[in-house]
Amino acid sequence: MVVVAVSVFACRGGRPAQVGTHAALVESSQASAPQGTSRADWDSANVSGFYYLQDPTPPWAADIEFFQVSSTDLAPLAGDTSSAGARVLHPSSADSEALAAHPDILQFQATPLWGFVHLKTSPDIMPINFEMVKSRVAAGTLTFSTEAVSGVSYDFEGTFLEVPENARYGDTVLVGHLRKLREGRVIGEGQVKLTYSRGE
């Protein structure tokens, strides 16, 4: 790719919570979304994956390719202190490929929620990721803020319409308010809708 998102931003002294706007967006999106997600579903829900902005994308967010959110990470098996596990965790290797090649020394482990905002780049340019430094999921809401890269950062507060891994391809699964900041000042903000992909 979260607690009651509005409270996170309110206590930060940021922009006034646009409750009416966000509520209207959630209500209109829920009209076509599957219903019946219980609190128990959210307590065990896996929201790890990739989230893509749906059109129309705000012009100031057009360079965002996706958000990645995860609550697991690939790590050497517990008790493995050899260098073998560390070697296969090379950043250029896909997790699934590494795990398939080394099931004897690697496993997925639960971690605190982590992720990043990934920008679109050409193949010859180093990927640009804004790592999430404050992120939380709780009872169907997601909030995060990112570290700054060259003075630019992002923050987001949103509501899941359904458990992402239960969604059909192309469904809107997350709606919320996204902000882009430069040196702490808002230079773009708006309501957005996102689709979901589990990824590899």
Image (tube, rainbow, N blue to C red):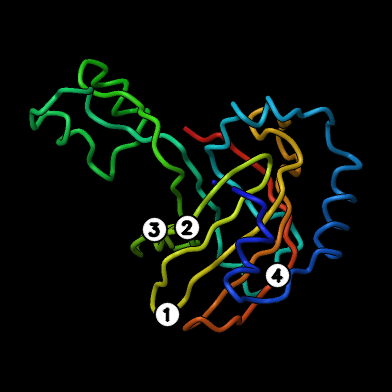
- Residue 44 coordinates in the image, percent (x, y): 59, 26
In terms of sequence position, does the residue under pointer 4 or pointer 2 come before the other? 4
Dividing the picture into quadrants, the one containing residue 45 is top right
- As measured in the structure, the alpha-carbon distance from the residue carrying label 2 to the one carrying label 1 is 17 Å
* Pointer 3 residue: 123
- As measured in the structure, the alpha-carbon distance from the residue carrying label 3 to the one carrying label 1 is 24 Å
Disc number placed over residue 58 in the picture, else none: 4
Determine the residue positioned at 66% across, 31% down: 42
Which element type, helix, strand or loop, lies under badge 1? loop
| Disc 3 crowd, CA 10 A, few/some/many (<14, 14-19, 20+) | few
| Disc 1 crowd, CA 10 A, few/some/many (<14, 14-19, 20+) | few
Reply above or below: 154 against 195: below
Task: Check whether the beta carbons of the residues at disc 2 and disc 3 lie within 8 A of each other.
Answer: no
Q: Amino acid at mark 2?
A: Lys
State the residue lying farthest toward the top: 104
Determine the residue positioned at 29% across, 38% down: 93
